[in-house]
Image (cartoon, rainbow, N blue to C red):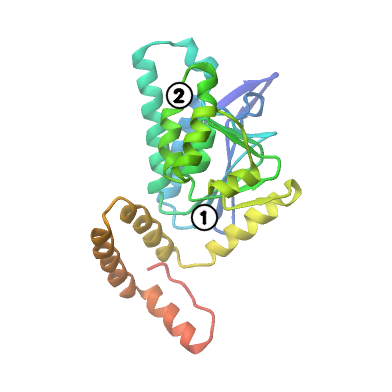
Amino acid sequence: MNLLETTIGTTEPILLRHDSDSITTLTLNRPAARNALSTGLMTALQAALDAIAGDPAVKVVVIRGSGTAFCAGHDLREIRATPTPAAYEALFAQCSRLMQSLVRLPQPVIAAVNGVASAAGCQLVATCDLAVAAESARFATPGVHIGLFCSTPMVALSRNVGRKHAMEMLLTGEMVDAYGALRFGLVNRAVPDAELDEAVGKLAAVIASKSALTLRIGKEAFYRQLEQDLAGAYDYASEVMTRNMLARDAEEGIDAFLAKRPPVWQGC
């Protein structure tokens, strides 16, 4: 990325991108700030997502943090440097756009949670389609400790865990460990720290082996039907199934299954 940050005499990209076998890994790279979402980091992440959205070579995205934290939320020092309504509105509008871009991204996104994910960092985990947590990972929406309710993180959190669990996290601000997050439904899996990369890699590879077209259709349909009533959701899902059935990859997948051979995806 072209956005840099100077720390301890060195200048480094604040977001790293690595591509391998149709899987793109984006690493939040502000370890000294526990990967807090500065405006610069959010700008870099937004630019990366915008580029990935139109990249047919990418089938799965992994987001992780460098150092010992996943993401500590917004950069409070940066926020307090410009304490004006206009600055606050711009900050939260930028963050909201970023989170919605993750949901709208055609490719599935996996959060590889290697450490603390708090406030907007917890929001980021909740917004990703899937999440795998290391045993040492901790999750919190701790705004209440400093007189600031985590209202924007609440949007993603309340749409991914049960109401009682969401309210407990929001009202107490207390840390939830990896297995608690698994029980709440905030993450899909909790694994020993040493196995995080392997677990995420295997999950990403399984998804990447599927038809890119099918993944795009399925992710979009999943989120759209959630916002509809039951009858509307079934009507919409039926339309999606019909369109999907007419795709070349669906024909190939069915023919391959019947012929007991691996499918050859075309992405159309």
The answer to which quarter of the image holds residue 239 is bottom left
Residue, far bottom: 259
| Residue 261 image position (x, y, % from top left) | 54, 84
Rendered view: 2 above or below 83:
below
Q: Please name the residue that numbered disc 2 is placed on.
A: 149
State how far apart marks 1 and 2 are (Cα): 33 Å
Nearest to viewer (mark 1 / mark 2):
2
Residue at 53% across / 62% down in the picture?
207
| Residue 202 image position (x, y, % from top left) | 64, 60
Residue 3 in sight in this render: no
| Residue 253 image position (x, y, % from top left) | 44, 78
Mark 1 crowd level (few <14, some 14–19, many ≥20, 10 Å Cα):
many
Please state which amino acid type lies under the numbered disc 1: Val
Task: Determine whether, in the image, residue 60 is placed left or right of residue 217.
Answer: right
Q: Please name the residue that numbered disc 1 is placed on.
A: 60
Rendered view: 264 above or below 102:
below
Task: Determine whether, in the image, residue 84 is placed left or right of residue 29.
Answer: left
Q: Earlier in the sequence, mark 1 or mark 2?
A: 1
Quarter of the image where the C terminus is located: bottom left
In the foreground, 28 or 47: 28
